[in-house]
Image (tube, rainbow, N blue to C red):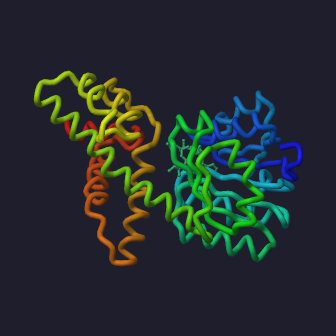
């Protein structure tokens, strides 16, 4: 960190993930300026020494790097492309890192718009959930230029552990889509196993203890099944965001005539839960589908 040329970071998006990620950057010694749509979510970080900016553009001004982790592609578009947004205000030579899970096409648009201004852009979505964000153990999958990735490694290292350059702009988001597709079967599999065990009259905690260390074990089983058993549906990872991701993945697959039958079924299950008013629950609430 002492030798690292970049010290000043603008950070936009202080939700479930962003708050912890920003805090870990401060702990690593970076100087943070923060912006969020709802200012009160910045209170804790401001008390810990972060500066507040009134707009995304102000947050990006004069920073060595700008990190975003907002909600949807439309939010990313807004904070980057608006008149008082990041692209119009970041200094040439700055590094823009979008860690939102968003569309690969949008990441390429940002990369090209940034390049035209002499700015570097990386798409760097994450996996590991609220727990990984708190513990700085996120997996970070990065698209963009290799040299920009190498320069930003100390920033990534403050937030994650499994940090990989996946290819050109958009490749980070494509990797994240593969991750989201893999989750679909894993989370539904855990729910179906619990639904079956319940119908068979078994002790559900006992079943998890018996099967989670064998071939059926998974991150979903270790982290989300206990929340399902406790009736704890707090996000974690919002159902509404997972629907956003599976829709992006489906659009990408449709574009290359690839069928994703498991992901599509699970998308339909989550869409039904959202229609029933559960979009702000965590993804572990898929168990409600079986009740
Ligand atoms: P979240 O709690 O909703 O956080 C998003 C934050 O961004 C909110 O604080 C929101 O402001 C802010 N925001 C949204 N649009 C904005 C805009 N236009 N301008 C300024 N601020 C804006 O969601 P999250 O769980 O942290 O997830 C963030 C992203 O990471 C999503 O794309 C999600 O899919 C992805 N992700 C999440 C997880 C997870 O486990 N949670 C894991 C991996 C990836 P408000 O406070 O006003 O709502």
147 on left or right of 228: right
Tell which of 39 and 141 is nearer to you: 141
Task: State which quadrant residue 111 falls in.
Answer: bottom right
Residue at image coords 43%, 64%? 248
The outermost residue toward the front is 214
- When the figure is inspected, residue 109 is found, relative to residue 177, above or below; the finding is below
Residue 74, position as x, y percentages in the image: 55, 61
Picture quarter with the N terminus: top right
Tell which of 51 and 236 is nearer to you: 236
Count of marks overlaid on the render: 0
The outermost residue toward the left is 200
Residue at image coords 19%, 35%? 195
Residue at image coords 75%, 33%? 27
Residue 79, position as x, y percentages in the image: 66, 58
Picture quarter with the C terminus: top left
57 on left or right of 105: right
157 on left or right of 77: right
- When the figure is inspected, residue 250 is found, relative to residue 139, above or below; the finding is below
Residue at image coords 43%, 60%? 178
- When the figure is inspected, residue 270 is found, relative to residue 259, above or below; the finding is above
Tell which of 163 and 101 is nearer to you: 163
- When the figure is inspected, residue 29 is found, relative to residue 271, above or below; the finding is above
Residue 119, position as x, y percentages in the image: 78, 68
Task: State which quadrant residue 189 falls in.
Answer: top left
């Amino acid at each position: 960190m002492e030798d690292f040329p970049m010290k000043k970071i603008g950070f936009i998006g202080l939700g479930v993930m962003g708050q912890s990620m920003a805090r870990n950057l401060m702990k690593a010694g970076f100087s943070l300026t923060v912006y969020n749509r709802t200012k009160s979510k910045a209170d804790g970080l401001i008390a810990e020494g972060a500066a507040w900016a009134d707009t995304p553009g102000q947050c990006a001004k004069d920073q060595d790097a700008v990190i975003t982790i907002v909600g949807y592609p439309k939010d990313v578009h807004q904070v980057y492309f608006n008149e008082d947004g990041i692209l119009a205000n970041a200094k040439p030579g700055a590094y823009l890192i979008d860690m939102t899970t968003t569309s690969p096409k949008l990441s390429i648009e940002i990369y090209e718009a940034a390049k035209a201004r002499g700015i570097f852009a990386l798409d760097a979505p994450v996996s590991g959930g609220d727990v990984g964000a708190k513990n700085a153990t996120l997996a970070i999958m990065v698209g963009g230029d290799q040299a920009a990735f190498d320069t930003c490694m100390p920033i990534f290292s403050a937030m994650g552990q499994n940090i990989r350059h996946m290819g050109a702009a958009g490749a980070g988001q494509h990797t994240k889509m593969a991750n989201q597709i893999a989750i679909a079967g894993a989370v539904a599999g855990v729910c179906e196993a619990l639904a079956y065990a319940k119908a068979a009259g078994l002790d559900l905690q006992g079943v998890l203890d018996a099967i989670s260390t064998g071939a059926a074990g998974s991150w979903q089983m270790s982290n989300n099944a206990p929340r399902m058993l406790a009736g704890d549906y707090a996000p974690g990872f919002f159902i509404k965001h997972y629907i956003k991701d599976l829709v992006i993945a489906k659009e990408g697959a449709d574009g290359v005539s690839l069928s994703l039958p498991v992901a599509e079924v699970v998308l339909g299950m989550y869409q039904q839960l959202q229609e029933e008013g559960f979009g702000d629950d965590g993804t572990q609430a898929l168990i409600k589908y079986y009740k």
